[in-house]
Amino acid sequence: MDLDTILRAAYDADASDIHLVAGEPPVMRVHQVVQPMEFPVITPEAAMKMFRQMASEEAQSIFERQKDADFSYEVPGLSRYRVNAHMQRGRVGMALRSIKTRVPPLADLHLPEVIARLTYLPRGLVLVTGDTGSGKSTTLAAMIQAINERYAKHIITLEDPVEYAFSSKQCLIEQRELGQDMPTFASGLKHCLRQDPDIILVGEMRDLETSALAISAAETGHLVLSTLHTVNASQTVERIIDMYPAGQQNQIRSMLSTTLQAVISQTLFTRADRPGMVPAVETLLATPAVRNLIRENRTYEIPNVIETNRAIGMCSLDTSIAELYFNGLISKEDAIAQAVYPDKLERQLVA
């Protein structure tokens, strides 16, 4: 059983994820539905052969020590993959997330127009949040590509692993991969500040040190783009503040209130009108009122500010979901299932 044949079949089916587990046939996820592929069961020997075909020597060494390894793999002319290899029941398993080789234009992603406006920002912190598989990496890649086509700037990305591979156009773009090009996000970010960047993409603000360095970079005049695994704007602000000890939280509220430019929170839905996915997007823009709420520890009022500032591009997640439903893009059942306030949204959809 040939690895590239499996990946080609998954690509033709528009699969977002492929699972290769010893003792099971290959499985793919298509538009959020997991389904078996028409291939035989993978033997332990075949699974290990596939792993060695994809993983670098360094990734194989890490896997031998830790029984887990994250790395990237590319089939030229087809797709790039973010791969996690792991052990389960004493046998190897792999999860591959497909990353299309072509960075999609922002206009093709069905995102709010305000997100394109954020690519004109000269400095500050922009966060794209959502669950795993919600399209955060694609949104960030499209934003970087929009900047790349417009400005002559220096962009540095810090990723785990590198997903979309950029070609420098107007900008000079450097991409650094965790493990291969830097030991940690924090280390890469610390040294990145000495490399004359204009724009920094941090794959994930996953710990206090990375968060502190990202906010400091935004404070010193850089545009910093990053992600968090949070489901809405107010939770994102709270998560960042909660990373810090209690004695430092007032200081970080003040720093975050001055550096934050926007929070984009995404949830992907299966389209009802045709095959494919479409995002519902909550958007928070850092207006003076929002900055005051962050500074004064009144983040619980952020949803109200979002609701009352739609004219300037803010939008709550439930409002975005309702718009998708009324435009015929998603089903009522999916809309209610993923709403922040399901009962309220159900009444709105009936009305």
Image: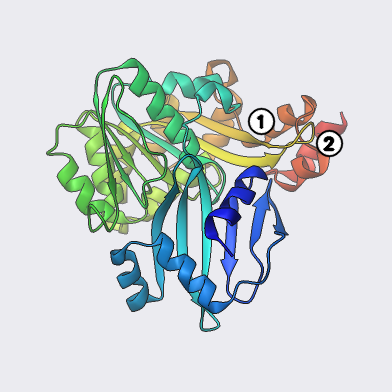
Q: What is the x, y in percent for residue 175?
A: 28, 41
The furthest residue to the bottom? 90
Residue at mark 2 to residue at mark 1: CA–CA distance: 15 Å
Dot 2 falls on a residue whose secondary structure is: helix
Q: Which mark is residue 197?
A: none
If the image is split into quadrants, where does the N terminus sit?
Answer: bottom right
- Which residue is under mark 1? 320
Dot 1 falls on a residue whose secondary structure is: helix
Task: Let me know if residue 141 appears in the view.
Answer: yes
- Which residue is under mark 2? 347
* Residue type beneath disc 1: Ser
Side of 152 relative to 308 (left or right)? left
Q: What is the x, y in percent for residue 165?
A: 37, 38
If the image is split into quadrants, where does the C terminus sit?
Answer: top right
Relative to residue 319, is residue 57 depicted above or below?
below
Q: Nearer the viewer, mark 2 or mark 1?
A: 1
Dot 2 or dot 1: first in sequence order is 1
Dot 2 alpha-carbon crowd within 10 angstroms: few under 14, some 14 to 19, many 20 or more: few
Side of 326 relative to 276 (left or right)? right
